[in-house]
Image (spheres, rainbow, N blue to C red):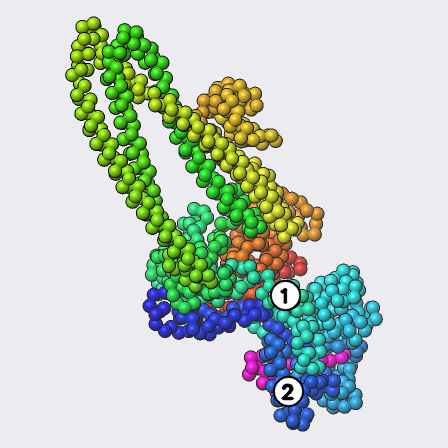
Amino acid sequence: MNDHMAAPSPLVTHTHVRNGARLLVSPAHPWPEVIARALEQSQGARYYRCALQVNTPLQGRFKGFDSKHRKDTESYKRDFALSLAQKCKKVGIDIIGLCDHNSVDYVDVVRKELTQEGILVFPGFEIASTEGLHLLCLFDLDSPAEELDHVLTELGLPPKDRWVTGRGLAPKQSPKSFPQILEIVQKNRRGICIAAHMDRENGLLSECAKTTRVQYFTDSNLMAGQISGARRDLSTFERKIVAGELNHYRRQQKIALLNCLDVYNLKDMENQACSTLIKMSTPGIEALWQAFLDPDSRLTLLTERDGEKPRAGRQNVQVELIALAWEGEASFLHGCGIHFNENLNCLIGGRGTGKSTVIESLRYVLDQPPLGEQARRTHEAILRDVIKSGTKISLLVRTNQPSPSLYLIERLYPGEPAIYDETGQRRKLHVFDLAPGIDILGQHEIAELANDASKHASLINRYRAETASRQEANKHEITQLLEANRQSLTSTLTELHEIDDKLSQLPALTEKLKLFEDKGIEEKLRTHTLLAKEEQTLGASRDHVVVLQRILEQARQRLELEPLSLPAEARDQLPNADLIERIQRALEKLQGTLGEHLAQMDSAIAQAREELLEIAEKWHTRKQARQKEYERALTDLQKEEIDGSAFLRLRREIEQLEPLRLKREQLQQKRLQLERRRKNLLHKRDTHNKNLFVLDKKAADKANHLLDQRVRVKLKRGANYSAFVEKLKSLKLSLRTDFLEQMCAAENFSLADFVNHIRAGQHALQEHYKFSKKQAEGLAHLDEATLLEIEELDPPDVVNIELNVNYPHAAARWRSMSELSTGQKATAILLLLFPESHTPLIIDQPEDDLDNRFIADTIIPTLRQAKRQRQFLFATHNANLPVLGDAELIIALDAGGDGKAMRAHIHETHVGSIDRESVKLLVEQVLEGGQRAFEMRRAKYGF
């Protein structure tokens, strides 16, 4: 992080709130100023724990609070407000709805004290309709109490006519009907209503006659209703009503269900049925409205979590993006910063505003190469022309393994990534160590992935059980051993062929020698013959020492290249550092011992060489002494017209060949051992393949279950013979591709059998595979090295991906990848990418490769489910993704300036979720073309 790591930097104390759990980024963290500024940006929607039906001591039923002041004084109200604030903080309540019956007397005091403690207050009241049905009426956070009092009057409850027996004892019913109250509060007064305790006394589902109940429950103005516990606790009848299973009660918009039981005692705040988790980016009535429109995404009932921790479902997440920033005066994004949400993030903006630059910046800082050639060119062009030389990209990430930690990754363009921990210390880590397996896809890369069948297996791997990685590691080791075995076996066979060629000369040489022996030459030159044998032994001994010397040198080089020691940083901050230290000492001792032994062997070899040299000198001296005797014997033979030197040359040749017999036997033994070893390795590999297929079958079943009736995966074990076909075609044997593919497609085809049939010869090949005579002869003459390569091929499983192209809820209509359009293929691939991953998924304009119908009908439902367990970042021009996908964070980019001074901007008001008015307007303008365009399309469609 260069100089700013050593010197104090502008810091930020920022609290991440994730699913109700607060994660504090300590002010002691020396994050650079650009990251600190990014952390100040809105993180979008997060869960707030909301108790929306809090009563006050004004109600006669209220218990559990006392004060030294009189009940009707401001001091008494303030004491209550302080006690309420303290209880909210203890329980973890972020927002309350103040809902006294027919009264707003406590609103100002409670709002003032709770706001000072960081707790928000929706002011409001509870009211009973003329039918006796209760409703909670909530208004914006800053709504004046006086204005709310006027609303009560408008609902037929003037100040002097709100109680039956006395203030706070028996509230009067409004003369307005249930639908009228909804209309006045929500349409006229911009508030929002919740049908109170629907399943209890004075509730909509328990008090009405059937006709009235149906009419009121299906009223389009009713957005939300309160239940007293979990859905499973409702009666069967009530459960069917809220689930939309009864025709008369079926609503166009699903009713939002909340837990917000009456709080009549401060202890009630601890009851899970008194509060609900509501996801909002900017708390207010608009945020509640959006939550009630999309309850599946934005509401979580604590009564249905069964003890589940706030971040349950995300404990397996490996890494999350926290903040991203750019520094570089020449860069298009200089000074911009993004504070990511842990769920769905969407970048929007017109063309040329920097959305793709953000995606490619992440690819660059995370050191992830593009998949395809076109993507690579685009990536390099954006780095060169938009990010520009000298720009530094900073990315703050959070890792959960082995324990939650924050790391800063910085990368200058051009340059390499640098990683820093929370103390500002640079760590000797690679980006992959922190963020393995992050999926980043640029424009059209989904289509590229869809069209490459070889990459489809990797999509299924993410659904595998953890044991698969061990199986893969073992199989990889076996693959390496098979390759080494092939090299050794090929070398051994080559030596055997060379020896056989030499030994083939032996019968002829032996026959010639016999002719000399028949003339008695053997006896006359006996001494020199024996000297030739001794000379052969001397030469063999020197060769043996040279071989040993070479082996020893290889061992020394390996020990020097791969020292058996652990780097010091490997022991830092480890929980069992004492044991690691012992490992270090043991390895150092082993290395020292091996070094000593190598030195001893060096000395032994040097001593042997000296001794052999001395022996050779003495032998040559003795041989010289017999030289005159040898010359006389040759002279005598010449008198008899016999070439004695020819006999000796022949004898020497035979003597040199004779040891090869023994070596051949040794090589034959080695060959048999290697072949047995190879057979065992092939069997082990087959076992691992069977085990992996079982795991992959389970993975496919899991994917099919998670993507029920949308995508279907089928596997066929070891049936992808494309590499085998290419290998045979490369042999130039005039083998047609279609013929080979048809051969491989046969039910009983086996690669091992095919290799054995080649070894069996031409007739076996013609009998089993219908090869022509010429083709069979060509295959039968393949050398063993080529057969070993073919035998070593490991055909992968065939992954067949199918997409249901019919509409949701209709009978499934499955189509394989070969039958799908480009957009449909991309849809299938994207659906497989969504679930079962513990790292972010980042895609630039996925809609470019997708069919629009499939985005709404198929992609969105899957995305809404998957974002609970995984972080997503999309750059998009399609409103379906941020709106129907209910993006927790929408970042709107724009650009300004002239010519070369053009620069991207991310305004503070342009960041948030759809519940923020300024963000909603931008979504309308940028993605829908504005309200007028949207209304025109709606009118033309006839919606």
Camera-near label (1 vs 2) is 1
Q: CA distance from mark 1 to mark 2?
A: 32 Å
Mark earlier in primary sequence (1, 2) = 2
- Indicate left or right for 634 with 83 as reference: left
**Residue 523: x, y in percent?**
26, 11
Query: Disc 1 marks which amino acid?
Result: Glu
Instruction: Categorize mark 1 by other alpha carbons within 10 Å: few (<14), some (14-19), many (20+).
Output: few
Secondary structure beneath dot 1 equals loop
Q: Which mark is residue 815?
A: none
In this orientation, does residue 757 appear?
yes
**Residue 286: x, y in percent?**
61, 72
Q: Mark 2 = which residue?
A: 80
**Residue at horizontal 64 percent and vertical 89 percent from the top:** 77
**Residue at horizontal 69 percent and vertical 64 percent from the top:** 253
Is 118 inside the magenta-drawn segment?
A: yes
Quadrant where the image shows the N terminus: bottom left
**Residue 326: x, y in percent?**
40, 64
Q: Mark 1 = which residue?
A: 308
Query: Disc 2 marks which amino acid?
Result: Phe
The magenta segment is 107-129
Q: Is residue 279 above or below residue 718?
A: below
**Residue at horizontal 63 percent and vertical 78 percent from the top:** 96
Q: Quadrant of residue 544?
A: top left
